Each structure stands twice: as C-alpha cells, then as structure tokens.
Image (cartoon, rainbow, N blue to C red):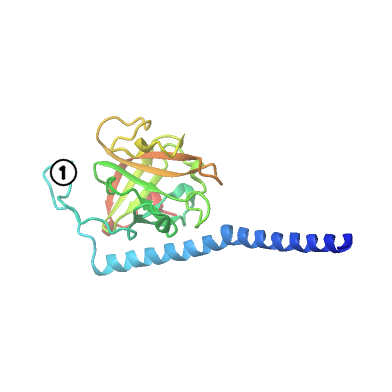
C-alpha cells in the first residue's frame, strides 16, 4: 500500500469520525433541549387542562395553622403535579414538577424526590433538575442568592419560598441534604422547607449543588399570580 493511499485513507477516517462527533454534539447540546422543551410544554398543558376540568381540592379549613391534610392521594410516578417559577432565571422560566427523579422523568422537567414533603407541607419539598442538556433548566443555578423567590403552583395555591443562602457544594452520596430538616442548611427544627439539587460541575456529575429555601408566603390561585412573578 502506497504512502499516499494510507494518508488518504487516514484523512477520510478522520473526516468521518469528526462528522460523527459533530452530530453527537449537536444531538447532545441542541436536540435534547428541543425534545425537553416540547416535553415540558406538554406536561404543563396537561396540568392546566387537569386543573381547568378537575381542580385540585384545597386543604380543608383547620383550627390549627400547622395542621396538614389527612391522607392525600399519592402523586403518580412520572406525572406532573405542579409548576415551578424562579424569577432569578428569567421572567419566562417555568418548568413542570413531576413525581420521582428517574432518568426519563428528568428528561421532561424537574423531578420531586419521592418520599419528601409536598409543596407547602411541613418537612422538605425536594426537587432535582438537569443543569445541562434536556433544556438546561438549572443552568444558572450558581446565580441563586439569599432572598430569591422560588414559586410553586399546585393548581390551587401559589407557594413562595425564599432562598436561605448561596448554593452549597457537596457529593452525590450526601443524601442528608433532602432530610426533613436538611443538614448543612442552617435550618433548625421542623419547618416548611424546599431543597433544589443539580449536578456540579456544569458539564459533569462528580458533585452536587444544593440550594435551600423556606416557605415565605402562600396565595390562592384564584387571587392571581403573586407579585414575585409580575413583569
């Protein structure tokens, strides 16, 4: 085989491999985002249709402000039950929150850690989301600052949480960050908390970024959006 043929063959192989790499990058960075945006929009449409036809029943009146609804129906795995808005990430930032944190669930929106609290309940409402790929919902996670609002809508109530401190970096095995009173959060005693988790570094998954918040206010959906979402 001549040197010229070897060089030509090697060049063609390099071009082919390069083209495959480019296609993979386009799929990984662009197409997964397109798919996730369409899927998330579909989940939100599903929720809005559900709320319009069969609104979620609000908690019954109680003499105690700390009382919780008794035996609520469990969330369905992989199905949406709320939407989340984080004004720090932009006025149009809205993602569905679905039950569980399985891979296929996080490809459609944010995932609720099964077994953690529901929005507004005593305990820790814990939610995970991709930082990159599948729509990059938590791309700007490091920008969160104390006092930032995280607003959750379950169809009957707007729950406004306030970020307690700048995001905390930890390892994936640190499951105590989603405990009812999350470790390292600075919170003490029972309360109504929110934990957000995502991957760290931005294009890796060796660590996790954690943001904690506490429930600051509630507002019936019938009264319109809370002021934090005003343009």
Question: Which residue is depicted at the point 26% across and 56% down?
Answer: 75
Residue 59: percent from left, percent from top? 18, 53
Dot 1: element: loop
Residue 138 picture location, percent across and down: 48, 49
Residue 170 location in percent, x, y?
A: 45, 35
Quadrant (top left/top right/bottom left/bottom right) for the C terminus: bottom left
Describe residue 109's horizontal placement relative to residue 193 as left or right: right
Residue farthest left in this picture: 63
Q: Quadrant of the N terminus?
A: bottom right
Question: Is 174 or 194 nearer to us in this picture?
Answer: 174
Q: Position of residue 123 (x, y in %)?
A: 26, 40
78 with respect to 140 (left or right) = left
**Front one among 41 and 32:** 32
Q: Looking at the image, which residue is at 34% across and 45% down? A: 126
Q: Is residue 186 shown above or below 145? A: above
Determine crowd level at label 1: few under 14, some 14-19, many 20+ residues with C-alpha closer than 10 A.
Answer: few
Judging by the rendered image, the residue that carries numbered circle 1 is: 67
Task: In this rendered view, identify the residue nearer to me: 92 or 38.
Answer: 38
Residue 196 sits in which quadrant?
Answer: top left
Name the residue rendered at 28%, 38% in the picture. Answer: 180
Report the label total.
1
Specify whether 57 is left or right of 36: left
Which residue is most to the front?
A: 1
């Amino acid at each position: 085989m001549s040197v010229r043929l070897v060089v030509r063959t090697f060049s063609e192989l390099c071009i082919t491999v390069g083209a495959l790499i480019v296609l993979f990058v386009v799929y990984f960075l662009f197409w997964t985002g397109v798919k996730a945006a369409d899927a998330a929009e579909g989940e939100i449409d599903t929720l809005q249709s559900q709320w319009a036809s069969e609104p979620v029943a609000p908690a019954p009146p109680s003499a105690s402000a700390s009382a919780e609804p008794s035996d609520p129906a469990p969330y369905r795995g992989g199905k949406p039950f709320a939407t989340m808005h984080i004004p720090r990430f932009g006025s149009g930032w809205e993602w569905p929150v679905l039950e569980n944190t399985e891979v296929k669930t996080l490809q459609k929106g944010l995932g609720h850690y099964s077994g953690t609290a529901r929005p507004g309940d005593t305990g820790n409402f814990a939610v995970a989301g991709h930082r990159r790929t599948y729509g990059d919902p938590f791309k700007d996670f490091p920008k969160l600052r104390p006092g930032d609002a995280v607003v959750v809508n379950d169809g009957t109530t707007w729950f406004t949480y306030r970020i307690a401190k700048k995001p905390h970096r930890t390892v994936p095995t640190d499951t105590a960050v989603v405990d009812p009173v999350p470790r390292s959060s600075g919170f003490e005693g029972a309360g109504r908390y929110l934990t957000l988790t995502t991957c760290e570094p931005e294009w890796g998954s060796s660590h996790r970024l954690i943001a904690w918040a506490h429930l600051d206010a509630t507002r019936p959906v019938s009264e319109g959006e809370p002021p934090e979402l005003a343009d």
